[in-house]
Amino acid sequence: MRGTLVLNASFEPLTTVTPRRAMVLVLRRKAVVEHAVPGSSFRTATLDLPVPQVIRLRRFVKVPFRQQAPWSRRGVLVRDRHRCAYCGRRATTVDHLVPRSRGGGDTWLNTVAACADDNRRKADRTPAEARMRLLVEPFQPTPGDAVLLAHGSQWAGAELPDWLTVRAAPQAA
């Protein structure tokens, strides 16, 4: 398991902690369990507690405002769910829509996840020049979206509360 998602009292995603640290916060009554891992528990001599997957702090914690999530190669792969933006197969690389050699930068809106074959085929061209159509348009996640996207695979197939669902990337027309 990757970790436990920590939500602020306002249900805003803050960070992740180890399940052990999450249990300490719950036992000290600083947080409540919002969602637990089904079938898993911490056992002690006197307690049998579910392993928290999502906890919410009881008191609001003021955090410095961050307008945008920092760009990273791993973040692009996670945002696109490790699926190639051109063919939909498993993506292992990041492709720049406007190549870096032409001034394209490492930004959320200029990069997409791509499989190695499509990345090689596109080479040093734009998708239009390579006659390759994007299946999804890149988008810039908010810092909260970035935290949720990073843990989206952990909840695959699980029923999530409405307040914890991640907005999907807009589909290309």
Image (tube, rainbow, N blue to C red):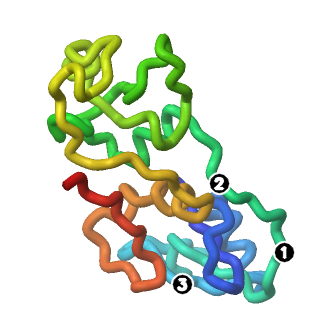
At a point 51% along the width and 79% down the height, the residue shown is 50
Instruction: Provide residue 64's location: percent of width, then percent of height.
Output: 83, 63
At a point 51% along the width and 70% down the height, the residue shown is 53
Mark 2 secondary-structure assignment = loop
Q: Are marks 1 and 3 in contact (CB under 8 Å)?
A: no
Instruction: Provide residue 42's location: percent of width, then percent of height.
Output: 55, 72
Badge number at residue 68: 2
Relative side of 21 to 79, left or right: right
- Please tell me which residue lies in front, 47 or 66: 66
Q: Mark 2 to mark 3: distance in Å?
A: 26 Å
- Please tell me which residue lies in front, 29 or 92: 92
Is residue 1 at least partly visible in the picture?
no
Q: Are marks 2 and 3 in contact (CB under 8 Å)?
A: no
Identified by mark 3, the residue type is: Glu
Instruction: Provide residue 153's location: percent of width, then percent of height.
Output: 36, 56
Q: On the image, numbered disc 1 is attached to which residue?
A: 62
Q: How crowded is mark 2: few (under 14 residues within 10 Å), some or many (20 or more)?
A: some
Quadrant of the rendering where the C terminus is positioned: bottom left
Identified by mark 2, the residue type is: Gln
Mark 1 secondary-structure assignment = loop
Is residue 91 at least partly visible in the picture?
yes
